[in-house]
Image (cartoon, rainbow, N blue to C red):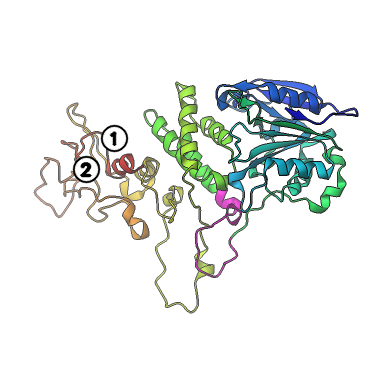
C-alpha cells in the first residue's frame, strides 16, 4: 500500500461491511481513512466473488423478502460517497489511476483510492471513497457525489449513484497490482469550491430527432428512463414467473440478455446477479447454482452489448411529405414483452418463445393433451396464421405444421371428419411431432430454434 503520512486528526466514519452479495448479515465499524485503507490492503481471496463488500453508510434492520439488508429503503445515513470508475463505461478518453490520484490531491479533498479486483494496466478500474465530516441524510448523497464526479469529468459509472450500492474490497490472489492510496485533505462536504465543476447524475433523455426516422440509440443517455424501466420489468417478469422445469433455462437466457443491456441499465455485474436471483420463485432448490448461472449469463452477455432503441410515437414521426401509407396494424400487447436484438427484431431465444406461446392470441386454445400415456402433446396452429409472428416480425418464427379440419397436425395419424367445411374442436393428438422432426415434448417451433440459436 502506498499511503501519504497523516499529520492531523482524521474523522472516524461509519462503514458497513457485508460478507457477500446477499447481505443477510452486516457489521458496522467506525474507522479513520487510514484504518480503512489498511483493511482494504490486507484482504485477499482466491476469486473475486469471495471478497467482502463495504459501504460508507449505516443500514437499519429492515429486510427484503429475500432477507437482504442492503437496499435503499434501509439506508439510515451516509458517511461518505463512493465513485466506481470502469474504463469500459467511459465515452472518450480513459483517466488512469495515477491521473485520478493527482486530480483528487490537487482538489484538496480527503479520499481513499483503491484498485478494483480486475484492475490491470490495460484495464483502469478503481474506486474513490470520499469521507464526510459528519453523517448526512441519504437524500444529500447526490450533491456530494456530483462534486466527486466533476473531478473525473463525469467519468464515474452510473451505478456510483445507487444509494445502497456496495463494493468489493481487497485483492484476488494477492495481486501485486493491487494498490491503495490515502490522500489528505478536507472532507468533500466541506469542499464547496467543487460545486463550480460538479457533474450530476447522468440523465436519460429521448432522442432529439422527434420528427425524423428513428435509429437505434448509440449511447445509454439517449434512452428514456421509462423505456429502461419497462425493459427491466419485462426481463424480470420472465424470471419471476418461471415454472418448475423452466427456471434454469429462463434464468440463463434472461441473465444473458441483462448482460447485453448492462451498459444501458447501469447495473454492475454483482447488482444484476443479485437482482436476477432475488426475482426467482422461492421454490428454487439450489440457490448457489442459480447464482452461478446468473453470473455466467450476465458476464457472457456483457461481452456482446445489445442496442436498445427508443420506440417512436407514430403520430409524431409521420412525415407530411411521405407518400400516404395505410396505418400499420398496432403490435399486440404481448409483443411488448419480447426481447429485441440489435436491429429491433425479436431474438430467437426460449424466453420469447415462451412469451408467444403463453400470451399470443393465435396460440390460445390450439394445444390439446392426449390422455393416452403413450403419446405427448404436439404443437398445432391454424392455416390462417401459419406462424406466430406477422408483419415486420414474421421472420423470427419458423413455420409450423398446419392444422387439418379435425384440429390435428397434418403430421398426426388422425383423420378428418366427414364434413370438412365445419371444423370440429381439436381432438387429442395421437402422434407428437414438431417442425424439426424432434419428438421431445419440449421442442416446439420457436423453442426449437431458440435452443439451437440462443
Residue at image position (59%, 40%) is 123
Position of residue 317 in the picture relative to residue 152 (left or right) = left
Q: Where are the magenta residues, as a range?
A: 207-229
| Quadrant in the picture for the C terminus | top left
Whether 414 is drawn above or below 393: the answer is above
Position of residue 59 in the picture relative to residue 363 (left or right) = right
In the image, residue 198 lies in the stretch drawn in magenta: no
Q: Which residue is mark 1?
A: 442
In the image, residue 226 lies in the stretch drawn in magenta: yes
Observer-nearest residue: 287 or 385? 287
Task: Estimate the x, y position of residue 66 in percent, counting from the top left.
Answer: 58, 26
Let me know if residue 7 appears in the view: yes
Q: Earlier in the sequence, mark 1 or mark 2?
A: 2
Residue at image position (64%, 52%) is 93
| Quadrant in the picture for the N terminus | top right
Q: Which residue is mark 2?
A: 436
Dot 1: few (<14), some (14–19), or many (≥20) neighbours within 10 Å?
some
Whether 335 is drawn above or below 1: the answer is below
Position of residue 422 in the picture relative to residue 305 (left or right) = left
Observer-nearest residue: 279 or 129? 129
Task: Estimate the x, y position of residue 308 in percent, counting from the top left.
Answer: 50, 52
Task: Estimate the x, y position of residue 32 in percent, counting from the top left.
Answer: 82, 26
Task: Estimate the x, y position of residue 429 in percent, counting from the top left.
Answer: 19, 37
Residue at image position (80%, 36%) is 137
Mark number displayed over residue 394: none
Amino acid at each position: 500500500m502506498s499511503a501519504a503520512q497523516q499529520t492531523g486528526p482524521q474523522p472516524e466514519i461509519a462503514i458497513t461491511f457485508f460478507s457477500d452479495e446477499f447481505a443477510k448479515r452486516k457489521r458496522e465499524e467506525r474507522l479513520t481513512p487510514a484504518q480503512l485503507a489498511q483493511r482494504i490492503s490486507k484482504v485477499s481471496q482466491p476469486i473475486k466473488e469471495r471478497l467482502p463488500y463495504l459501504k460508507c453508510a449505516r443500514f437499519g434492520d429492515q429486510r427484503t423478502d429475500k432477507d437482504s439488508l442492503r437496499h435503499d429503503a434501509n439506508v439510515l445515513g451516509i458517511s461518505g460517497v463512493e465513485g466506481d470508475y470502469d474504463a469500459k463505461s467511459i465515452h472518450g478518453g480513459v483517466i488512469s489511476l495515477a491521473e485520478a490520484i493527482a486530480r483528487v490531491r490537487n482538489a484538496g479533498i480527503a479520499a481513499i483510492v483503491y484498485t478494483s479486483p480486475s484492475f490491470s494496466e490495460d484495464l483502469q478500474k478503481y474506486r474513490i471513497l470520499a469521507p464526510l465530516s459528519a453523517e448526512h441524510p441519504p437524500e444529500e448523497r447526490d450533491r456530494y457525489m456530483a462534486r466527486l464526479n466533476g473531478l473525473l469529468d463525469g467519468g464515474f459509472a452510473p451505478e456510483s449513484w445507487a444509494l445502497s450500492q456496495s463494493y468489493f474490497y481487497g485483492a484476488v490472489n494477492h495481486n501485486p497490482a493491487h494498490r491503495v492510496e490515502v490522500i489528505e485533505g478536507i472532507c468533500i462536504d466541506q469542499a464547496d469550491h467543487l460545486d463550480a465543476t460538479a457533474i450530476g447524475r447522468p440523465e436519460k433523455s429521448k432522442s432529439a430527432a422527434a420528427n425524423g426516422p428513428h435509429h437505434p440509440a448509440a449511447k445509454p443517455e439517449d434512452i428514456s428512463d421509462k423505456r429502461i424501466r419497462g425493459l427491466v420489468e419485462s426481463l424480470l417478469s420472465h424470471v419471476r414467473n418461471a415454472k418448475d422445469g423452466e427456471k434454469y433455462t429462463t434464468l440463463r437466457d434472461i441473465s444473458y440478455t441483462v448482460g447485453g443491456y448492462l451498459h444501458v441499465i447501469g447495473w454492475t455485474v454483482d447488482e444484476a446477479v443479485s437482482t436476477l436471483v432475488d426475482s426467482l420463485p422461492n421454490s428454487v432448490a439450489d440457490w448457489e447454482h442459480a447464482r452461478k448461472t446468473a453470473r455466467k449469463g450476465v458476464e457472457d452477455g456483457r461481452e456482446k452489448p445489445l442496442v436498445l432503441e427508443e420506440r417512436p410515437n407514430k403520430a409524431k414521426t409521420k412525415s407530411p411529405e411521405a407518400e400516404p401509407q395505410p396505418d400499420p396494424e398496432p403490435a399486440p400487447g404481448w409483443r411488448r414483452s419480447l426481447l429485441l436484438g440489435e436491429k429491433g427484431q425479436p431474438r430467437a431465444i426460449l424466453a420469447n418463445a415462451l412469451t408467444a406461446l403463453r400470451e399470443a392470441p393465435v396460440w390460445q386454445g390450439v394445444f390439446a393433451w392426449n390422455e393416452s400415456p403413450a403419446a405427448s402433446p404436439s404443437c398445432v396452429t391454424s392455416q390462417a396464421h401459419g406462424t406466430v409472428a406477422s408483419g415486420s416480425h414474421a421472420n423470427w418464427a419458423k413455420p409450423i405444421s398446419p392444422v387439418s379440419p379435425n384440429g390435428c397436425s397434418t403430421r398426426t395419424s388422425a383423420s378428418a371428419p366427414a364434413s370438412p367445411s365445419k371444423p370440429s374442436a381439436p381432438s387429442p393428438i395421437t402422434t407428437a411431432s414438431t417442425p424439426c422432426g424432434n419428438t421431445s415434448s419440449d421442442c416446439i417451433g420457436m423453442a426449437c430454434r431458440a435452443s439451437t440459436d440462443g
